[in-house]
Image: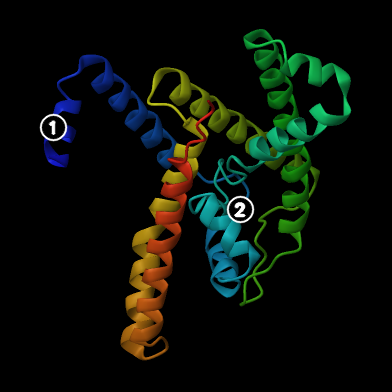
Amino acid sequence: MIGAGFGNIFKIPELKKRLLYTAALLAVYRIGVHVPTPGIDSVALASFFAKVEGTIFGIFNMFSGGALERLSVFALGIMPYISASIILQLLTVVIPHLEQLKKEGEAGRKKITQYTRYGTVVLSIIQGFGISVGLESMTSPGGASVVIAPGWGFRLMTVLTLTAGTAFIMWLGEQITERGIGNGISLIIFAGIVARMPQAIGNTFRLLSTGEMGIFAVVILALLMVLVIGFIIFVEQGQRRIP
């Protein structure tokens, strides 16, 4: 029954077009993850991330789909856009102008989206500058510097590259939402996490084979994943019937 439903998807021209468009844009995003930022010693950077795997750096790297580990042009990912969206949502409570825009329907929503884009660029510039300064002090376990030629030239180039990368991801997400199957930002985050799944599964089997992780822990982990997914589906399908 489910297989027949998936088979009918490609019999609907409009839906087929939207699926292919979404897949093409997600492929562009995954290609961009492998385009490195200029001025970085990729070997030294990979050694540094291998040392800090499992820390907060590893979590940010997962959400960026591995872009942070390579310091690609998409290293900041979509997080500045999400942060800007949250900030705008909070500001609508304290700023009357934003609250009024929220009540104006489609026109107000477009204006808030425009403010969100500006906020994304500002946050990307700040985060990009912080990353460029932090990279200059990073070294690999062997003592090699991550940055080939430190200085303001490198900082400005990194800020420009990372900001442009985030702006492009934001544009991809909006195009998927408007012309694809919807929820473009969520799909970009999903694509980044799924891209790391084969490596995560491989590491789990490696730990299991070496005895560092027991079979009981793997079973518990799998059950927790199923329960979390089930709970999310339950909440998403929840309805409040109003008489």
In the image, what residue type sits under mark 2? Answer: Ile
At horizontal 54% and vertical 25% (from top left) the residue drawn is 171
Please name the residue shown 48% across and 36% down the image: 239
In the rendered view, would you say 155 is above or below 149? Answer: above
Q: Is residue 159 left or right of residue 234?
A: right
Name the foreground residue: 33 vs 149: 33
In the foreground, 212 or 15: 15
Q: Please tell me how crowded label 1 is: few (under 14), some (14-19), or many (20+) other residues with Cα within 10 Å.
A: few
Seen as rendered, the residue at the extreme front is 243
Question: Relative to 114, is 32 on the left or the right?
Answer: left
From mark 1 to mark 2, how far is it between C-alphas? Answer: 46 Å
The relative height of residue 141 versus residue 122 in the rendered view (above or below) is: below
Circle on res. 40:
2
- How many marks the image carries: the answer is 2
Q: Which quadrant of the structure image shows residue 98?
A: top right
Instruction: Judge whether residue 69 can be spotted in this image.
Output: no
Q: Is residue 148 left or right of residue 193?
A: right
Where is residue 37 drawn, in percent x and y? 58, 44
Q: Secondary structure at mark 2?
A: loop
Which residue position is annotated with label 1? 7
Which comes before the other along the chain, label 1 or label 2? 1
In the image: residue 2, left or right of residue 29: left
Q: Residue at x 75, y 57 (%)?
A: 134
Residue 4 image position (x, y, % from top left): 11, 35
Residue at (38%, 23%) from the top-left corner? Answer: 180
From this viewpoint, is residue 129 visible? yes
Q: Amino acid at mark 1?
A: Gly
